[in-house]
Structures are given as C-alpha cells and as structure tokens.
Image (cartoon, rainbow, N blue to C red):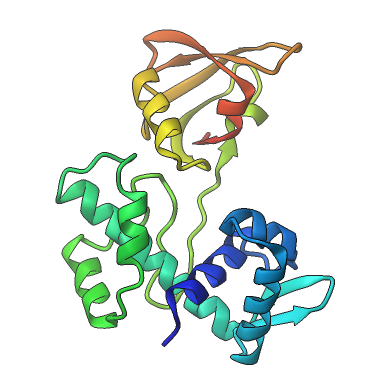
Amino acid sequence: MHSFTEENYLKTIFHLSKEDGSVVTTNGIAEVVNTRAASVTDMLKKLAEKKLINYIKYQGATLTESGKQTATEIIRKHRLWEVFLVEKLDFKWDEVHDIAEELEHINSPELIERLDKFLGYPKSDPHGDPIPDSNGKILQKPFVNLNKMKPGEQGKISGVSEHSAIFLQYLEKSGLTLGTLIKIIDVMEFDGSITLEINNDKTISISREVAKNLLAVI
C-alpha cells in the first residue's frame, strides 16, 4: 500500500510522460505538484527504492511496470468517481475534480469493480478522458486539438486538456461542452483566434489558448 503523496507522484509522472514512457524531469514534476525540486528528488529516490520508478540523477524518472500499473489504477478510480459524481449525484463537470482526488485513494479493488459495473462500464469520464479498464489498458480516442484544425473542417467536441473549474465554466457559458458539433470558419493569422460555428446554429470566436485545450473527433 502506498501513501497519498506517493500515489500522486506516480500519477503525475504518468501524465507528464504522455503515457509513452518518456523521461520526466524533476523540475517538471516540481511544477505540477507545486513543491521544491529538492523535495521531489527525495520522493523519487523513495519511489525508486520501492521499484515503482527508474530514477537517473540529473535526468529524471520513468515508471516501472509496477509503477505504471499503480498509476493507471489511480487514474481509473479517479475517472470512475467523476462519472459517478456527475451521473448519479448531479454534480457539474467543473465541480468533481477535487472530490475525485480524495476518493481515488480509497484502497478497495472490490468497491471499484462494483462501481464500474454499477455505472455500466463507462469508457470515458465527464471531461472526455478515457477510463483505463481493469487491466490498465487505455483506449485512446483519435483526438485533434481545435487549434490544429483548418477552415472548413468539422468535428465534435469530445474532450478537454484543461480541467480547471474556471475553464470548464467558461466552456459551459460558451456552449462548448462535450458533444457539441463544431465547424471551423476562420483562423486569424495574427493571434491564432478561431471563428467557429457550433451545432449548425451560431458563430462564436475563441482564443488560441482556448482552442488548444479543446479536443475534437473529426
């Protein structure tokens, strides 16, 4: 059994490695967990002793198979709890992240398997992120960032890469929630802002920063 802090580090390394096993730097981890690089180094040494990561001084860390399994289990729990909170307790998608951060540390495989069954084996969470199956396998969707799309291309908003409450609230007010049909009308060369049509109904303009955090399936 691992501590909350250890689990959070493993999850952070998993996300920063972009799930391809690339080396994650100490400074990169420190920025995410909001602590000093020296404290991160101490934790990485501890995780390496437990054989959850491979740690190379001055380079960074990669997850071992055991570490990756633990990380995907935590992510699986987090995303299933988010589905439960939204679908069964009527929380909004911008309200569930912090609560799921608490619930993901409950160490009961039987509870999670029953939760998965109760929810009907969902494939993605309320933010469009894929939910790992019980074997840790993640079925990735063919997402495209809106800022990579060209005028005339169409798709459906199917995920977000920014989960902050303020960003999700902005999307809600702008009508850019999951399932929204979009068509790129124009891309401004000066600042990368995008004009798009949503649900074949109205036209709005969004910044490049918003566009790069919206994911579509085209």
In the depicted structure, whether residue 42 falls above or below residue 31: below
From the viewer's perspective, is residue 168 above or below residue 200?
Answer: below
Asked whether 53 or 175 is in front, the reply is: 53
Query: In which image quadrant can residue 75 be found?
Result: bottom left
- Residue 149 falls left or right of residue 72: right
Q: Is residue 155 left or right of residue 148?
A: left
The residue furthest right is 58
Residue 81 on image: x %, y %: 28, 60
Whether residue 39 appears in this view of the structure is yes
Q: Is residue 161 above or below residue 45?
A: above
Who's the residue at 52% across and 56% down the image?
Answer: 140
Towards the viewer: 33 or 71: 33
State the image coordinates of residue 34 (x, y, percent, origin top left): 59, 55
Q: Residue at x 41, y 26 (%)?
A: 171
Q: Which of 3/168 is in front? A: 3
Residue at image position (42%, 32%) is: 166
